């Protein structure tokens, strides 16, 4: 069983892929299927003589342990909010690449770089918004519209976690509809009463559409960070509020996003109302974005260098004072 948004994106960008299977719904089902998927991945690594496995999944870490393959794990979540990963995945990765917002964790074999995962594809060197996407859906850059994003909370680290209630979602729609168009995107099945607000775009158009929006209100971590690095005001309401270091940095240091617990929904509503009255909101947030970008590297360029020169790049980038912006000038022959 495939995940449509992923396969749609891979098809659009003409990237070949294999589907190993789905991950299951409840924790028991996930664990059972993880064993099957790990066996499949191990076979894949051996048959294709893979030297390096790269990704965000426990799958590559566990399967690589039974082969000659080495595993690089991309991880931008605090260990405390992902206990399964912290105990059963992170310790077994050959190398971990994480944003330096998590540097306080001081994990073994971790390289902390000054950037975010989302800047791998949304850094100005990688992403230029296309206003023609708006015209395709009958909009222009002068139109005000708001995006609501609702999470499914199905990942292993989402157990016992949650976001906004149905009534809270209704309140948001009613408020934002008075100020412009409202579009809703969701991982879960969209409630019938919100069907008229369903986001009509293709998956590969999401970031263009997000960039030109006035605001994102969400219970999703990733999309909130995406909005932040694009310079779009982002409000997040879920039980992870205040517990994720990357989003905390984007909020407390750069003022680009806001987080509230579900019980603090009324506080969030008050903050949203304040920003709705700011006439030059887009300009203010774009200036905040410029400050953030000036402090962060083009992480795709760093990752590419790191992988191409692995494992020598591990030793070099772990040296105190290593310049993550000028890594390309480094003489690896000296390592």
Image (cartoon, rainbow, N blue to C red):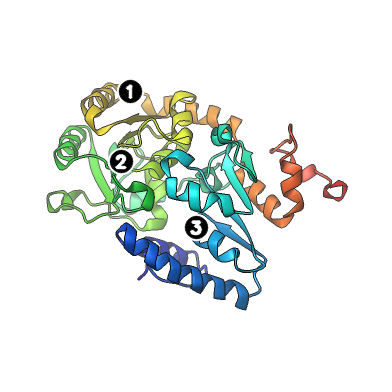
Q: Residue 23, located in which quarter of the rendered image?
A: bottom left
Position of the N terminus by quadrant: bottom left
- Residue 16 visible from this viewpoint: no
Residue 44 appears left or right of 322: left
In the rendered image, residue 232, in percent from the top left (x then y), is placed at: 40, 35
Query: Are there few (<14), some (14-19), or many (20+) residues within 10 Å of tag 1?
Result: few
Question: Which circle marks residue 279 in the picture?
Answer: 1
Residue at the location (27% across, 42% down)? 162
Give the SS element for disc 3. helix
Residue 172 screen position, x and y as percent: 20, 35
Relative to 46, is 92 above or below? above
Tell me the number on the disc at residue 219. 2
- Report the residue marked by disc 3: 58
260 vs 81, nearest the viewer: 81
Give the residue at x 35% y 33%.
Answer: 241
Q: Quadrant of residue 280?
A: top left
Q: Which mark is residue 261?
A: none
Between the residue at mark 1 and the residue at mark 2, the CA separation in whole angstroms equals 26 Å
Q: Earlier in the sequence, mark 3 or mark 2?
A: 3
Q: Is residue 240 left or right of residue 125?
A: left
- Look at the numbered disc 1 and give the secondary structure of its residue: loop
Residue 70 pos. (x, y %): 65, 61
In percent of width and height, residue 61 lies at 56, 59
Mark 3 packing: few (<14 Cα in 10 Å), some, or many (20+)? many
């Amino acid at each position: 069983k495939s995940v449509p948004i992923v396969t749609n994106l891979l098809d659009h960008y003409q990237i070949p892929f294999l589907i190993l299977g789905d991950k299951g719904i409840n924790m028991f089902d996930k664990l059972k299927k993880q064993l099957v998927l790990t066996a499949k991945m191990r076979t894949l690594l051996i048959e294709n003589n893979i030297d390096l496995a790269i990704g965000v999944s426990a799958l590559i870490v566990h399967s690589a342990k039974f082969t000659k393959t080495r595993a690089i794990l991309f991880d931008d979540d605090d260990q405390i909010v992902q206990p399964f990963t912290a105990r059963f995945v992170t310790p077994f990765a050959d190398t971990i690449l994480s944003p330096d917002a998590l540097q306080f964790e001081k994990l073994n074999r971790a390289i902390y770089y000054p950037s975010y995962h989302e800047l791998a594809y949304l850094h100005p060197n990688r992403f230029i918004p296309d206003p023609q996407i708006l015209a395709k859906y009958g909009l222009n850059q002068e139109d005000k519209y708001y995006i609501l994003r609702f999470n499914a909370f199905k990942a292993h680290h989402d157990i016992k976690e949650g976001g906004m209630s149905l009534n809270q979602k209704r309140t948001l729609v009613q408020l934002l509809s008075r100020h412009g168009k409202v579009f809703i995107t969701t991982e879960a099945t969209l409630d019938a009463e919100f069907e008229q607000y369903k986001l009509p775009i293709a998956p590969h158009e999401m970031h263009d559409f997000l960039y030109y929006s006035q605001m994102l209100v969400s219970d999703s971590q990733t999309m909130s960070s995406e909005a932040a690095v694009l310079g779009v005001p982002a409000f997040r309401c879920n039980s992870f509020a205040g517990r994720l270091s990357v989003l905390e940095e984007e909020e407390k240091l750069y003022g680009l996003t806001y987080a509230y617990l579900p019980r603090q929904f009324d506080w969030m509503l008050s903050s949203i109302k304040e920003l709705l009255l700011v006439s030059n909101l887009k300009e203010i947030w774009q200036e905040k974005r410029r400050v953030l970008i000036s402090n962060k590297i083009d992480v795709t360029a760093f990752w590419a260098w790191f992988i191409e020169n692995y494992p020598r790049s591990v030793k070099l980038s772990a040296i105190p004072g290593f310049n993550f912006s000028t890594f390309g000038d480094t003489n690896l022959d000296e390592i």
